[in-house]
Image: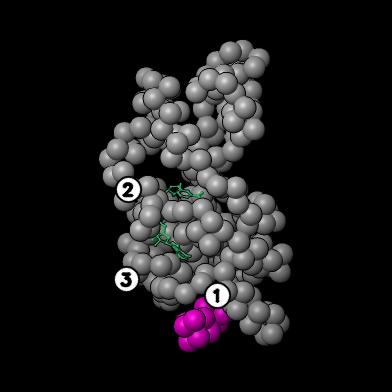
Amino acid sequence: MDKKAVDQVVSVLANSRNTIVVTGAGISTEAGIPDFRGADGIYRKLGENKVMNIININAFNRDPEEFYDFYRKHFAFPPAEPGKAHLMLADMEKKGRVKGIVTQNIDSLHEKAGSRKVVAIHGTADRYICRNRGCQGVYDQDYVDRYEEVVPHCEKCGSVLKPDVVLFGENIKDYVEARDMILGAQVLMVIGSSLTVYPLAGFVKEFTTFYQDLIIINKGRTQLDHAALVKIDGGHTGDMLEEINRQMDLRGC
Ligand code: NAD
Ligand code: ZN
């Protein structure tokens, strides 16, 4: 673990009244959910274009069967529990050290870890919503797993169900809230994101044009490494957050 960088992060966080955390797929790899852009990720295996062409709202509307065929095969997350990194962030929020999380993840692991203020801009993978707007049917993963056909339908009205995740071509959820949280932060700590997916990467970039206090904890390079006050690359992220939290306990801040 980079001791000097960890100490620096502790000092920055200790002086912050409003720390917001931004997380991406990299925070969940230690909990057993692979990322997309990492070495074994789906983008490397299948190519980003192929994924974008199917995990796309137009493709979904045109041919839900083809969509679900692919989605069930490649997007089913293994069952996972929150990792140490998720648990540490939840504890840091309880102690007032973190005010909220904006996440690109769709695995609900922050909520399961006990974090309260979580804005999941790409939605939630284990929720399915009826496409008939007037119906408002909501279903869980179990319902879809047990459904006998490839394309799940609503029990109440018979319409097709869509995973409650933001597909390519759709707007992110809670755009204004996410942007306000990020631009209102005193310190922004990005964990496990390559900062290539927009608009989130744009919000972080905008933050750096006004403020300097950006911390990045990510394996591999990100698009905003040059703008970070501290960048930590490598090591076990859960252990690192545990150490940061422990040092803040010791300092009583
Ligand atoms: P991304 O662009 O945010 O990249 C993930 C980054 O995390 C990579 O740079 C990788 O090197 C880094 N990383 C991997 N393990 C790490 C660790 N232990 N500690 C620190 N950093 C680590 O995300 P992506 O994988 O390109 O996914 C794109 C989008 O797909 C996401 O924004 C999300 O919507 C969705 N997705 C979600 C999940 C999830 O919910 N767990 C998983 C995969 C993809
Ligand atoms: Zn319905």
Q: Nearer the viewer, mark 1 or mark 2?
A: 2
Q: Closer to the camera, 210 or 101?
A: 101
Image region (quadrant) for ligand 1: bottom left
Residue at the disc numbered 3: 226
Q: Is residue 12 left or right of residue 199?
A: right
Q: Could you tell me how far apart the alpha carbons at marks 1 and 2 are, in whole angstroms?
A: 30 Å
Q: Is residue 246 visible?
A: yes
**Tag 3's secondary structure?**
helix
Residue at the disc numbered 2: 45
Q: Nearer the viewer, mark 2 or mark 3?
A: 2
Residue depicted at 66% across the width and 15% down the height = 156
Q: Could you tell me how far apart the alpha carbons at marks 2 and 3 are, in whole angstroms?
A: 29 Å
**Tag 2's secondary structure?**
helix
User: Tag 2 or tag 1, which sits nearer the N-term?
Assistant: 2
Residue depicted at 36% across the width and 26% down the height = 59
Residue 98 image point, x, y percent = 62, 65
Q: Closer to the camera, 48 or 15?
A: 48
The residue at the far top in this view is: 157
Q: Closer to the camera, 197 or 179?
A: 197
Q: Is residue 174 magenta?
A: no
Residue depicted at 32% across the width and 71% down the height = 226
- The amino acid at mark 1 is Met
For the record, the magenta segment spans 1-13
Quadrant placement of the C terminus: bottom right
Q: Is residue 123 above or below residue 242?
A: above
Q: Is residue 125 above or below residue 19?
A: above
- Prevailing secondary structure of the magenta residues: helix
- The amino acid at mark 2 is Lys
